[in-house]
Image: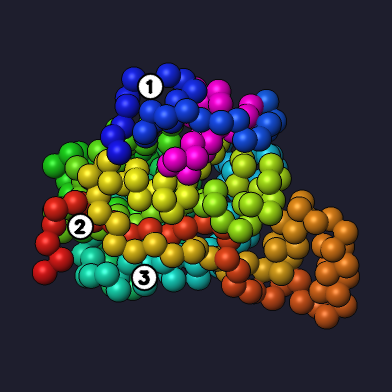
Amino acid sequence: MTADLHAAPDACFLCGGPQRTRFALPGRHLLYCPRCQIGQLAPLPSDAELAALYASEAYFRGGGDVGYADYVADAPQQARSFRRQAEWLLRHGPVGDLLEIGCGPGVFLTEAARLGIARPIGVDVNPWAIAAARARGVDARLGSIDVIPPAECFDAVVMLDVLEHVRAPLPFLAEVRARLRPDGRLLLMTPNIRSFLARVSGPRWVSFKIPEHVRYYSPRGIRALLAVAGFEVMAVRGAGQYVTVAFFLDRLQRLLPAPARLVRRVAVALRAESRVIFLTNGSIDVIARPAGVSSG
C-alpha cells in the first residue's frame, strides 16, 4: 500500500482508493475507505478554523460543543488513566526523555515524571494549557512539534487524542519520526472507528466531535498509516479510562436517554455518582517504533 499525496478530494489519502459517504454529520459528512478502514471529515476544516477552536481556555474548561467538559475537574481521573498508559509504555523499554504533543495542562507529563522519566517535555497550541502545565512545574512550550528543533531527539513521543485532529497525518508523522531516536518509541491513542461503541452509536458516536476531529482510524488503518510513515507497530490494545459514575451517565444520556435516567436514579439513591470506575472508551492505544530497528 502506498500513499497518493495528489489523490482527488474524495479519494482516500492513504491508498488513493474511493471513499464512501457513511454518515451525515452537523454541517459535514463522513467519508470512509473500506480498504483502509479510515474515516475522513468532509469538507476538511481549514488550519485557521482549527486553530481558532484550540486557542481559548474554554477548550479545556467546557461550555461548548468542542474540547473537554471540564479538564480541571476531571484531572484526578485523567491522572490515573495517564499513569496506566505511561506504565504500558515503560513495559516496552526504558525512557529517559519524552516529548508529549498536545500536552494540555501537563497531567500526563506529571505522571511520567512520578514514574521516573527524567526529562518530560510537552507542547500544546493552547496558551492557557501551557500556563497551567508550567504551573505544575512541567517544561511546556507553546506550539506544535515545529517548536522542537529537529536535532532534539527523544526516547519516546506521546500523542494522546491528537492524531484525529491532524489534517495531513503523513507529513506530521514524518516530523514525529525525526524527533525519535532510532530505538525510540511512539505511544498514541486515537478513537477507533471500528470499535463496538462506534458501531452501536452510529452518527451519535461521542468521538464525532465536529469539526475538530478530522480523521478516524481503526486498528487496520493505524497499522497501514504507520507503515507508510516509516513505523513498525509493536503493540495495539483497546484503550480505557477512569471516570466518575456521573461522567459516564452524562455520556450515556446522549446515546440512551431513557436507560441513563433510570441508572442515574439508582446512582443517586446509592450516593454513587462520585465513585470512580474504569471503562473502555472506544479508542485504541498503540506503541510503535521506527521501522528497520532490531528488537535485540
In front of the other: 234 or 279: 234
Q: Is residue 134 visible?
A: no
> SS for tag 2?
strand
Viewer-proximal residue, 64 or 175? 175
SS for tag 1?
Answer: loop
Residue type at mark 1 is Ala
What is the secondary structure assignment of the residue under circle 3? helix
Which residue type carries mark 2? Gly
Is 88 in the magenta?
A: no
44 is within the stretch colored magenta = yes
Residue 46 horizontal/vertical position (percent): 49, 22
Residue identifier under label 3? 88
Span highlighted in magenta in the image: 28-51
The label nearer to you, 1 versus 3, is 1
- Please give left or right for residue 47 compared with residue 290 in the image: right
Give the residue at mark 2: 184
Residue 176 - label: none
- For mark 1, what is the residue? 7
- Residue at (50%, 70%) from the top-left corner? 80
For marks 1 and 3, the one nearer the N-term is 1
Residue 3, percent from left and from top:
31, 32
Q: Is residue 183 visible?
A: yes
Residue at 21 percent across and 65 percent down: it is 96
Instruction: Give the residue type that dot 3 points to.
Output: Trp
State which tag comes first along the sequence, 2 or 1.
Answer: 1
Crowding at mark 3 (Cα within 10 Å: few <14, some 14-19, many 20+)? some
Q: Residue at x 37, y 67 (%)?
A: 86
Q: Gap in Å between the C-alphas at discs 1 and 3?
A: 37 Å
Mark 3 and mark 2 in contact (Cβ < 8 Å)? no
Q: Are marks 2 and 1 in contact (CB under 8 Å)?
A: no
